[in-house]
Amino acid sequence: MGVNDTYSRGRELLIADPVRAALVLALVVLLLDLVRQLVFGQVPVSQFVVLLKDGLMRGLFFGLAGIGLSMTYSILNFANFAHGDFITSGAFSGMIVTYIIAGGFGAEADIGSLALVGAGGSVFGAQLGIGVASTPLAVLGGVIAAALFTILLSLFIDRTVFEPIRDRSGITLLITSIGVAFVLRYLIAFIFDPSRRGVTDSNAVPSTDILVYDGFVSVDLHEVSLLVVSVLLMLGLHLLLQRTKLGKAMRAMSDNEDLARITGIPTERVIRYTWIIGAGLTGVAGYMFVIWNGTLHWFQGWILLLPIFAAVILGGIGSVYGAIVGGLVIGLTMSVSIVWVPTGLARASAFLVMILMLLVRPSGIFSGGSTA
Amino acid sequence: MSETAEPDEASGASETAGAKQGTRRFDDSLLSVRNLDAGYGDLQILTDIDLDVRDGEYVTIVGPNGAGKSTAMKSVFGLTNRMAGTVTFDGTEITTTEPEDVIHLGLGYVPQNGNIFTSLSVQENLEMGAYILDDVPEGALEAVYDRFPILRERMEQEAGKMSGGQRQMLAMGRALMLDPDLLLLDEPSAGLAPDLVDDMFDRIDAINDDGTAVLMVEQNAKEALRRCDRGYVLVDGQNRYEDAGEALLNDEQVRRDFLGG
């Protein structure tokens, strides 16, 4: 009887919604194939766990960085293309502070090099032994600086660029934000020089190998740090949105701005806090990504913006929780997909997943949920 | 400029016998709108409007579609472009006051559409109603829950998942959180099932009986006039008639022209 039910439900789905049925079928085939590959040892279990870990790290970063993008969308009603360069700004500002603290405020190298200015590479992060364990204070200072600088930057840009055109359409704001993105990106390239530099000392990162079935999976402290920081910030944001008056006002405003205004919610102040929280998280995300990834360069954020957009759209643009879930889906897809496709197609497969999911749920996983 | 602009002693009923064209003005009004021109952007909808609501009074605005009823109400709350004339509330001129400041003065407004935060819970909607206070006023919250017990039952529910009648109650409850002196209601019966309309009017009566003045726009004109103290008939963005609700209801011409016989 149960089997019959399943059959008839499957038949109904096939007729009513062939796209969804095809997707479910494809997913089942992929999962079965994954099990086959794991069982027959074509993909060692430990290697698969490494992929999962890697995907989780990426996903947490996409989620954390995507929150700000989704918040500005829901409260200010535009897609902020300068968001990627906020990530880069956070990474650079944080790293400068880290370098200066780790470099003994000029003791180890001249302050200009420590501030990463100009011809890059005169000081390597490895030389200063930068790492969460080796230079904890420098990293802590970097996290704080990344958050603060990105907040100030976003408030400055909002005041000078976005506030005067607040009542224009989302398209006007979007195009303006592309302009802001270019300005920021090339300012960064101009000041800090367009080289790619290694910023952490990989030998100074404690790691441990964990035996997983048929092999070892290495977990290092920078991965744990990214995990802990992301989860704590996401939890904090959740509590803020659900428990505090400000958080509820933000949700109210993203839900119905006109009603928020006649309820006496000071909308400009809420907008300011939206930038502060969104940019703060974005700056920290950028910095933690660089700590995890170990390299820093001027168009990092721009490259990352595309999968972040995919994550946010997949989750349901405007929803904070959607950004987190979407980030995890995109991150995991990007890394796990290489079981089936060449590495070069990993990103493409993440976007494919986004497109396919949107065919089924056009407004995203947390559709219509706004910031709630 | 109204021709009947002699300010009367506000003794209530019988300054004019039957509904004459024109509009009385009152001296002791809680809300008084004088010679107001207003609209949206450059588009003028209202011309030379007078409106009064006295303390504790229940006033309705009726009139054909497009007469500017909702616009008149929005103008009181600062949601339109006010081009000429004045709006005074409780002795304070609020002609140019922004909506987010008007609420501080004791005016509550329930728009016709989009009057609740659909993704917030019932309780959170009510909390937002008291946003301008430092703390959620427990007394007011309890009073709203006592007035609309269904809201207490649904306290944790997402507001968007409630029925039309419950949404309307939540919207009113939200506006009552600050215990306003004057409640503005835009088409409170719109979209309600017929058997709920009477209930909604009963609830508005009860709010008014507890001392809150009500200014209401209603398309259900007969019922609104039957229940209110005084009514205005607006036509083409201008005052046409003003009188006690019953008087308007019994006036031949008003009935023929605006109440469908």
Image: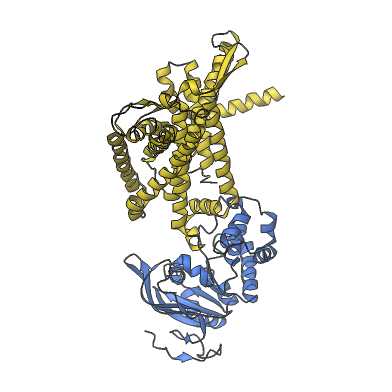
Out of A137 and A237, give the one closest to the viewer: A137
User: Can residue B95 be seen?
Assistant: yes
Which one is in front, A288 or B157?
A288
**Quarter holding residue B78:** bottom left
- Image coordinates of residue A57 in percent, x first then y, are 51, 28
Q: In this view, does B168 lie above or below A230?
A: below
Q: Residue furthest front?
A: A107
Picture residue at 60% right of the left edge, 26% below the top: A10
The residue drawn where x is 64% and y is 50% is B157
Relative image position of residue A348 (x, y in whole percent): 41, 24
In the picture shown, does residue B113 fall above or below A180? below
Q: Which colour scheme is used?
A: by chain
Q: Residue B246: name its quadrant.
A: bottom right
Residue B256 location in percent, x, y?
48, 77
* Chain B, chosen colour in render: blue
Marks counted in the figure total: 0
Question: Could you tell me residue A204's position as x and y percent?
Answer: 49, 23
Q: Is residue B19 above or below residue A6?
A: below
B121 or A210: nearer the viewer: A210
The quarter of the rendered structure image containing the N terminus of chain A is: top right
Q: The yellow chain is which one?
A: A
Residue in front for this viewpoint, B242 or A141: A141
In the displayed structure, would residue A344 be above or below residue A86?
above
Q: Is residue A366 visible?
A: no
Left or right, residue B90 beside residue A309: right
Q: Residue at x 38, y 25 (%)?
A: A124
Give the residue drawn at x 46%, y 49%.
A274
